[in-house]
């Protein structure tokens, strides 16, 4: 991932509604959620949610698919993981990490090193 793509993803997540929507889609998994379900979960207006889902889609963090009469939104896990990998790419002061990518410690390290 390059800096421009990372900034697009971070920018898309830098709003409370978009962050909440993305997190809900991550929890929903591969089945995804319809905008109606997201509206009910997040308590936002349908038109406002559509605007935010468009931003997440443009950043490559979500996809949409027409399923019958509904549109289903899903988180794009490879893009999410690539963003996380970009952010942690140079952790441990550039030393190789001791843990596999995606299995970051649940709590902050107690030493000056990141603990990975």
Image (cartoon, rainbow, N blue to C red):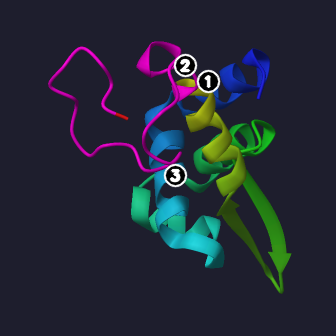
Q: Are marks 1 and 2 in contact (CB under 8 Å)?
A: no
Looking at the rendered structure, the number of numbered marks drawn on it comes to 3
**Residue at mark 3 to residue at mark 2: CA–CA distance:** 29 Å
33 in relation to 87, above or below: below
Instruction: Name which residue lies at 82% across and 69% down.
Output: 65
Instruction: Name which residue lies at 21% across and 29% down.
Output: 109
Q: Quadrant of residue 16?
A: top left
Q: Is residue 91 visible?
A: yes
Residue at the disc numbered 2: 90
The range drawn in magenta is 88-115
Where's residue 93, x and y in %? Answer: 45, 13
Residue at the disc numbered 3: 21
Q: Is residue 98 magenta?
A: yes
Nearest to viewer (mark 1 / mark 2): 2
Residue at the disc numbered 1: 11
Work out whether mark 1 precedes mark 3 in sequence or the reverse, and give the earlier one.
1
Q: Quadrant of residue 5?
A: top right
Instruction: Name which residue lies at 47% across and 53% down.
Output: 23
């Amino acid at each position: 991932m390059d800096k421009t793509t990372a900034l697009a993803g971070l920018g898309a997540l830098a709003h409370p509604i978009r962050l909440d929507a993305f997190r809900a889609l991550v929890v929903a998994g591969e089945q995804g959620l319809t905008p109606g379900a997201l509206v009910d979960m997040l308590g936002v207006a349908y038109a406002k949610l559509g605007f935010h889902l468009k931003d997440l889609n443009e950043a490559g963090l979500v996809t949409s698919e027409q399923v019958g009469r509904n549109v289903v939104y899903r988180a794009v896990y490879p893009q999410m993981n690539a963003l996380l990998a970009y952010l942690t790419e140079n952790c441990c002061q550039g030393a190789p990490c001791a843990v596999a990518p995606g299995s970051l410690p649940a709590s902050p390290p107690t030493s000056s090193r990141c603990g990975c």
